[in-house]
Image (cartoon, rainbow, N blue to C red):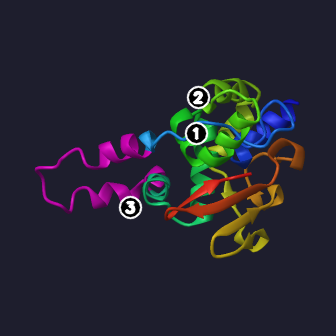
Amino acid sequence: MSARIVSVLAVGAALLISSCSGESGGTAAPAATSSAVPTSSSPTSSSAAPPAPSTSAVPSSSAAAEATGGDAVERYEAFMHAAGREDLATVCEIAGPAAKKAEDEGMGPCEKTMPMAFQLISPAQKKALQTATVDRSKIKEGAKRVEIPARAVKASVKFTDSDLGDAVMEKRGGKWYVVD
């Protein structure tokens, strides 16, 4: 049961507390906005100032993936990083379709269920998720659907299939979302 919840976070917040896949919510990218605010804090300055911070900071690339949709792997990495930071808005936005599916199956809204899921992730796993990456050679990639097995996730701690689960990303409206 706790393994399911951890897989929700890492897989796209898709399997929460039960054998349901997903979460609910789908808030509109508040995390991307708050990540972008520091990089555009000097709107009256030269336009060269905002691009420099956004290219030099690692979180900015995640923020860019969150804001524009990026590719599926970038978006999933942004999701994992957000889960590690307990960034509820970003997790629920990226996992919106999976979250809606879970809510329709009787789970509460993402904004209510994910904080419970965050509590079941160890501090070491949270820290590892903040910098986790995906080995692209281990994913199954299509034009509008990408399958990311748990074994493709590279992190400073070992995640098992039951910890993380596999993620399915779909492109909807130009952005990638966790759907399962």
Q: Label 1, label 3: how many angstroms apart (C-alpha)?
A: 25 Å
Total labels drawn: 3
Which of the marked residues, 1 or 3, is nearer the chain's N terminus? 3
* Amino acid type of the residue tagged 2 in the rendering: Glu
Query: Residue 118: image x %, image y %?
Result: 69, 29
Range drawn in magenta: 32-60
Q: Are dots 2 and 1 in contact, CB under 8 Å?
A: yes
In the picture, the disc for residue 79 is none
* Amino acid type of the residue tagged 1 in the rendering: Cys
Q: Give the left or right position of residue 73, taking residue 157 as reference.
A: left
Query: Is the N terminus in the top left, top right, bottom left or bottom right quadrant?
Result: top right
The residue labelled by disc 2 is 111
Q: Above or below — where is 123 with respect to 83?
A: above
> Which residue, as the protein is rendered here, is positioned at the far left?
44
Q: Label 2, label 1: how many angstroms apart (C-alpha)?
A: 7 Å
The residue labelled by disc 3 is 55
Front label number (1 vs 3): 1
Query: Looking at the image, which residue is at 39% across and 44% down?
Result: 35
Circle 2 sits in a helix, a strand or a loop, which is it? helix
In the picture, the disc for residue 92 is 1
